[in-house]
Amino acid sequence: MTKKSSQLWTGRFSEATDAFVQQFTASEHFDRRLYAHDIRGSQAHARMLAKVGVLTEAERDAIIEGLDAIRAEIEAGEFPWDPALEDVHMNIEKRLTDRIGEAGKKLHTGRSRNDQVATDIRLYLRDAIAEIRHQLIRLQRGLVSLAEREAATIMPGFTHLQVAQPITFGHHMLAWYEMLVRDQGRLEDCAARMNVMPLGSAALAGTSYPIERAMTCEELGFDYPSRNSLDAVSDRDFAIEFSAAGAIITTHLSRMAEEMIIWASPLTGFIELPDRFCTGSSIMPQKKNPDVAEIVRGKSARMNGHLMALLTLMKSQPLAYNRDNQEDKEPLFDAVDTVRDSLTAFADMIPNLTVNHARLYETARAGFSTATDLADYLVRQGVPFRDAHEIVGRSVRYATEEGKDLGELELDELRQFSARIGEDVFEVLTLEGSVNARDHVGGTAPTQVRAQVEAAKARLAAL
């Protein structure tokens, strides 16, 4: 006697699926992550089917209670996952039928795995984005706190990794914060565009059953039902958009990581990273390696790969659903984990940095960072800017030869380059004078940093 297949779709076939094909096409080992969202969607679908008369109230209740019991089994690690059943949906449906009998077979009325999985992924990603936004807000708050603490701490600002102009450490932290503000906006946009319900689209053309999509839409918290069944079951724009937003987030984190790695080096010595976020060497006992920052920097490559994978996956697919889309889940799931974990690591680490004020000040003072202030001073004395630029350039060359900073030159030494230079020039050649002079919206002056901190606190409180 031929053993009956455990698969739920074998009526059309005259032979069993090849064992390798069964293994090759199975997805339950990774899409089981969708179990809670699959159960939630199925329970909403059952309630709707009962309302329109496809299920009796008793069948509805049996299905809902059976799915609750299956959720408990999965969360207890007692669920009998079967690769032969291909995916999370058929595993749960089979288990439901085993538990409650014929009523379990009626659950799939009026839907397809195509609209079922499209709904599950949206529900899953909606929750994931909410969790990621929480970690993003934690990191933003940490940066704002650090900016407030170091609002007047002077450090060198760089272009081309060369000392450019003095800035405040708080100003630099708020630059990182602004990157994350844009990231928040992208996640909000992604979540809003994604919050459309595919359920009811069935395989591709809708269903002939008298379903009430508005009911399931409201219960599942979607903004509205999808307007086109073909598009609804085949659309993965939301996964691509999330991965694009995630790739930008990890690019921002990578830039932060790069600066922290440079700053924590003994060659620079600007900051000290907390020991609990570093590791040592197996052979060099003196080493303190910034491993968390380095790993986060590396995660950006992983995210870029996931984005490219999803774009490439979708680029040649005709409408509607194709089995290719099974390949959307692993990159998407890993993208969610990567972005969330990277943000969590930085949210825990960055607020606990130790800032080396003396070293920052010393480096800012040593790099002719007030040269632009001297040029601005000359312009205020009536010197055309291009002439002032030339004068300052010659002054810097002279100071370099003398082994001095501009602020260490005597007045007579400075006046050999321009008679317009007076005693008051030394007010602008100090680091404090330089940063305080940039007292405008977006500037590095401590007063502006503190104002931006308060504005950032208000924005974060409203999230």
Image (cartoon, rainbow, N blue to C red):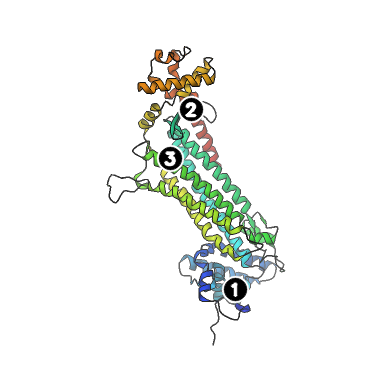
As drawn, 3 above or below 387: below
Disc 1 target residue: 104
For the residues labelled 3 and 1, the Cα–Cα distance comes to 57 Å
> Which amino acid type corresponds to the residue marked 2 in the rendered image?
Ala
User: In the image, which disc is placed on residue 259?
Assistant: 3
For the residues labelled 2 and 1, the Cα–Cα distance comes to 67 Å
Left or right of residue 459, residue 78 in this image: left
As rendered, which of 220 and 407 lies closer to the eye?
407
Q: Which image quadrant: the N terminus?
A: bottom right
Kindly report which numbered mark, 3 or 1, lies closer to the viewer in this rendering.
3
As drawn, 195 above or below 210: above
- Looking at marks 3 and 1 on the same chain, the residue that comes earlier in the sequence is marked by 1
Q: Secondary structure at mark 1?
A: helix
As drawn, 319 above or below 435: below
Report whether residue 31 is seen: yes
Point 35% across, 21% down: residue = 402
Point 59% across, 66% down: residue = 323
